[in-house]
Image: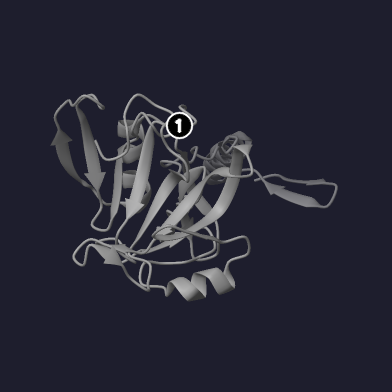
Amino acid sequence: MAVHARAHYLVIVGPRTSRLAAMGGALLLATGMTGCITSTTAPIQAGPVHTTTPTVAAPTPTPAPVPSYVLISTHSVSVVTRDNHTIVDIPFSTEISAAASQLSTALTEQPSVTAFPETSCEPAHNSYDWGGLTFYTTLPYREPGDFAFAVTAYSARTAEGLNVFSAGLQQVGTPIAAVVANVPGAIPDSHGVLVDAQPIDSPDHRWGVKLSSFSIPLQGDSDVVTSIIAPVFDQFGHGNCDAGT
């Protein structure tokens, strides 16, 4: 057996040693090759993506205005809220069926309808009543002639309990003396008081809102307002019909 010294390593050469060396070399070769293999990581499988949709609050609906009272003036009929916001203002020049529809919508009340036949003074027409408040076709002798309907309130409230006021905020049941005392410009006339009076062609020819004191059951005058009528003229005889026919 021969011994060779090389650097600081001692290498023993012999039959068994050669086999061991060969095995060791093979092992080193295998180890070295293994060390050259690049390690890889399997890709991560992505799951479903969850997204959150922001919740958008539904807009709050604007509440419908609540009617508080009906106001009858010389020019129109209005429905008003408690804070004095006008829901609808219906001029007397409005065609009567359209006027009735507008009032019904504002009051959320449906009227009772009465049909009237044609007469020598009037064509066939309907009246509309909300239990204390009535729309009807104006008579031909009512002037000026651009009015398509008139109104009469014969109760202080409608069927649903809404107050009905005249210009000057007077109601059925108010003493006539109180109307004269409290409403500026009130004009006492036959069977009541004219308020919100407007001149037509002379100071003596006026139209306005009539707070009537005429009592049908008694066929005479009362000391309180029995009905509110508009538009009313304090002189008649300017049409084809005479009053009362």
Q: Is residue 144 above or below residue 58?
A: above
Residue 147: image x %, image y %?
Answer: 44, 32
> In percent of the image, x 53 and y 57: which residue is there?
195
What colour-coding does the image apply?
A: one colour
Residue 218: image x %, image y %?
Answer: 21, 67
Q: Are there few (<14), some (14-19), or many (20+) residues within 10 Å of tag 1? A: some
Q: Which of 21 and 150 is in front in this view?
A: 150
Q: Quadrant of the image for the C terminus? A: top left
* 103 relative position to 24: left or right: left
> In percent of the image, x 57 and y 74: which residue is there?
181
* 217 relative position to 39: left or right: left
Residue 200: image x %, image y %?
Answer: 59, 37
| Residue 52 in sight in this render | no
Q: Nearer the viewer, residue 61 or 243?
A: 243
Residue 31: image x %, image y %?
Answer: 58, 41
| Residue 83 in sight in this render | yes
Q: Which of 74 and 55 is in front in this view?
A: 74
- Tally of marks: 1
Q: Is residue 139 above or below residue 214?
A: above
On the image, which quarter does residue 100 sit in?
A: top left
Label 1 sits on what residue type?
Ser
Query: Which element type, helix, strand or loop, lies under badge 1?
Result: loop
On the image, which quarter does residue 198 sit in?
A: top right
Which residue is the site of mark 1?
A: 93
Q: Nearer the viewer, residue 184 or 55?
A: 184
> In percent of the image, x 30 and y 51: which residue is there?
108
On the image, which quarter does residue 139 sit in?
A: top left
Looking at this view, name the residue that lies furthest to the right: 7
